[in-house]
Image: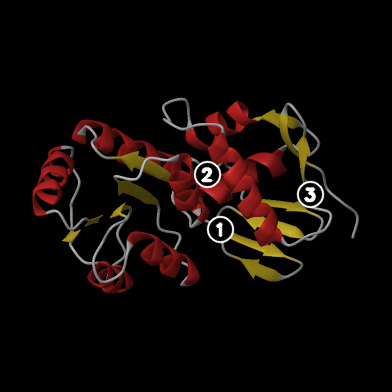
Amino acid sequence: MIAEDEPALQRLLQAYLERAGFTVTCCGNGREALEHIRRDPPDLLLLDLLLPGLDGLSLAEQLRRERHALPIIMVTAKSTEADRIRGLEVGADDYVVKPFSPAEVVLRVQAVLRRVREGQPPSPVLQQGAIVLDRGRHTLTVAGRPVDLTPTEFRLLAALMERPGWTFTRQNLLDLVAGPDFLGFDRNVDVHIANLRKKLGLKPSPIRTVYGVGYRFQPTDP
């Protein structure tokens, strides 16, 4: 789905995506997009931040509150680091700044969908103490409490839990959860880690900072 209120840009993105083999639905209003997603969820949402009716950030927040694990790529004219961080905090998987190349957007869509569809390792369940992550069902519970994660947060936690005690650099984590073709920056990892710690709600957090290096998952006794 493309949620974009500029008809010319909407048509351009649709043409490039359809040429790449995608079936595309377009919405020019945030509330219209939300209702359509509730009825017939797409595989991925290209989301403009400055939508009428319901802005893009509010739409993303509402989708996460409703437990939609829908991959989201935000498309916006806002290019500051604070804007990017805010987009990641509400659950975006990637961020594209206007003006952009439509061909690059297609590559980003393909990369995000590839990560979602092919990123599941063979062993379905990881458990460390009170944390149980089921990759087959794509669920997470902490002490029996269900916790909703975005697709990127889910992959990041799985990567950390697979090797408890191992220290990952930020670049290691970017490569593991996104792949070498991901056009991101190290700050992405910090934002996702902060979100994960908050959602796990454990003190001390099992996700430890290794200063000057990166992060590791350190199981704690109950």
- Sequence-wise, the earlier of marks 1 and 3 is 1
Q: Determine the secondary structure under disc 2.
A: loop
Residue 118 image offset from top left, x and y in percent = 45, 40
- CA gap between label 1 and label 3 equals 16 Å
Q: Is residue 7 left or right of residue 42?
A: left
- Write the residue at 69% across / 54% down: 197
Q: Nearer the viewer, mark 2 or mark 1?
A: 1
Disc 3 crowd rating (10 Å Cα; few below 14, some 14-19, many 20+) is many
Q: For residue 37, what is the image quadrant? A: bottom left
Question: For residue 149, which numbered disc appears in the image?
Answer: 1
- Sequence-wise, the earlier of marks 2 and 1 is 2
Query: Please, which residue is most extreme toward the right here?
Result: 221
- The answer to whether residue 175 of the structure is visible from this angle is yes
Q: Is residue 151 left or right of residue 193?
A: left
Look at the picture and state if 35 lies above or below 105: below
Q: Determine the secondary structure under disc 3.
A: loop
Question: For residue 120, which numbered disc appears in the image?
Answer: 2
**Screen quadrant of the C terminus:** bottom right
Residue 120 image offset from top left, x and y in percent = 52, 44
Look at the picture and state if 157 lies above or below 142: above
The residue tagged 3 is: 206
- Write the residue at 50% across / 31% down: 185
- CA gap between label 2 and label 1 equals 15 Å
